[in-house]
Image (cartoon, coloured by chain):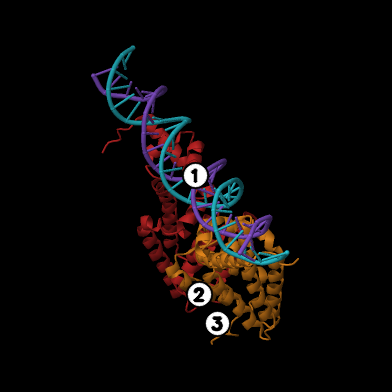
Chain colours: A orange, B red, C cyan, D purple
Amino acid sequence: MPQKQRADARSNRERVVAAARETFAAAGLEVPMREVARRAGVGVATLYRHFPTRTELVTTVLAERVEACGVQMRRALDDPDPWRALSTTVLEFADRQIHDQALNEALLGSGDLSAAFQQERREHTQALNVLVARARAAGTVRDGVDADDVRAGLLAIAALRRLPPTARGQVIGKLADLILAGIRSQRTHPDRPRP
Amino acid sequence: MPQKQRADARSNRERVVAAARETFAAAGLEVPMREVARRAGVGVATLYRHFPTRTELVTTVLAERVEACGVQMRRALDDPDPWRALSTTVLEFADRQIHDQALNEALLGSGDLSAAFQQERREHTQALNVLVARARAAGTVRDGVDADDVRAGLLAIAALRRLPPTARGQVIGKLADLILAGIRSQRTHPDRPRP
DNA sequence: CCGGAAGTGGAACAGCCGTTCCGCCATGAG
DNA sequence: CTCATGGCGGAACGGCTGTTCCACTTCCGG
């Protein structure tokens, strides 16, 4: 399938995606289509030519972000230190959720999007299972903690993004530490890797 | 100022508040005014006569729920067992957040409501400070844990209400246990009071 | 029981939203 | 350079929302 479309059309598509990416990350997935078009410097018709429905635009933008999560997960799987792999995953997840509202709503939203990324979700789940299993085998997590506990913690961190932006970062940091404290076994590692 | 309003007007007001209470708890604070009026069996004009703006209706309904939280908090302050007082507060908070979406959105919402309940929030905060301080003095919480940590945990529990209803209860339960595990010092008490 | 005022229902208004339509314009093959 | 055609902007449509308006109904003091 060759790209038979005109050069200006392709350029406009790029500008739309870029505008959507920035706007969704800053203001969430519910920003009006008009606003995205305005930020991209095009009319709404142009936007709808490239993405026939709002959902398609959202899905396209989210696919990029979800892939970035996959990359981080694969890096963690390559880490030889099981506790660092797990705790880094938690902390980087928190960071990502703080800085990208689109990703946040994708994870917590009403589920209509979930269908589109079921595959990625499964992979992420399985990777987390492996990370927790390794940490347990190494004795760095408390007895009785399983991957579902960690998942609950991650969801909680994500959910906290709804707080007013002033306190948000600090509260999420505290929660992340608290969850790591709840997970880890005693006197084996510090909560956070010190850089 | 005597109640000079007609009897039917007063009855209608009650019906509106009752309908709003149920609807807000089940479907959140954003249900259309028409829907509340329909459930109350009145026209929209009746609704607007008693509550000139949407915000006033919301505030009225929330005031009841917030007061219920205050009652629970005072009961906890009377509990002679510091760890039971604290853990019960966390678990009952989770329960309340699970069953009332209005209360949930009031706590996590965009902050326009926060102004109306600043006083209650302060009282709740101070009570939690006392509960944590007592638990620390009794040696039942881990060193370095303070009231802000517990508050972060509570917010996290509240935020999880956005999950799809199927998994919600279970995930919140797991998180509550995880947070209690992160808070408590070792080998002093079981996570949950066994009934 | 009666009359005026308080109370009411539902249509109507204004302002958002996603999406579609249509007359005009730039592009790039020949 | 020409001109058919794919692409474009912005007005317009239909459906949702909170809120207002007004002709009609119901209450209750005398």
Three-letter residue code for mark 2: Gly
Q: Secondary structure at mark 1?
A: loop
Nearer to us in this view, A85 or B52: B52
Q: Is A97 left or right of A166, judged from the image as shown? A: right
Q: Is any atom of residue B14 visible in this view?
A: yes
Three-letter residue code for mark 1: Pro
Give the position of the C terminus of chain A as an image quadrant: bottom right
Q: Residues within 10 Å of mark 1 (few under 14, many from 20)?
A: few
Q: Residues within 10 Å of mark 2 (few under 14, many from 20)?
A: some
Q: On the image, numbered disc 1 is attached to which residue?
A: B32
Labels 1, 2: one chain: no
Mark before the other along the chain sequence, 2 or 3: 2
Q: How many marks?
A: 3
Q: CA distance from mark 2 to mark 3?
A: 11 Å
Q: On the image, numbered disc 3 is attached to which residue?
A: A192
Above or below residue A18? Residue B93 is: above
Q: Identify the subunit bearing mark 3.
A: A
Are the residues flagged by discs 3 and 1 in contact, CB closer than 8 Å?
no
> Residue sitting at 76 percent across and 66 percent down?
A1
Q: On the image, numbered disc 2 is attached to which residue?
A: A173
Nearer to us in this view, B84 or A138: A138
| Residue C25 at x, y percent in the picture | 55, 58
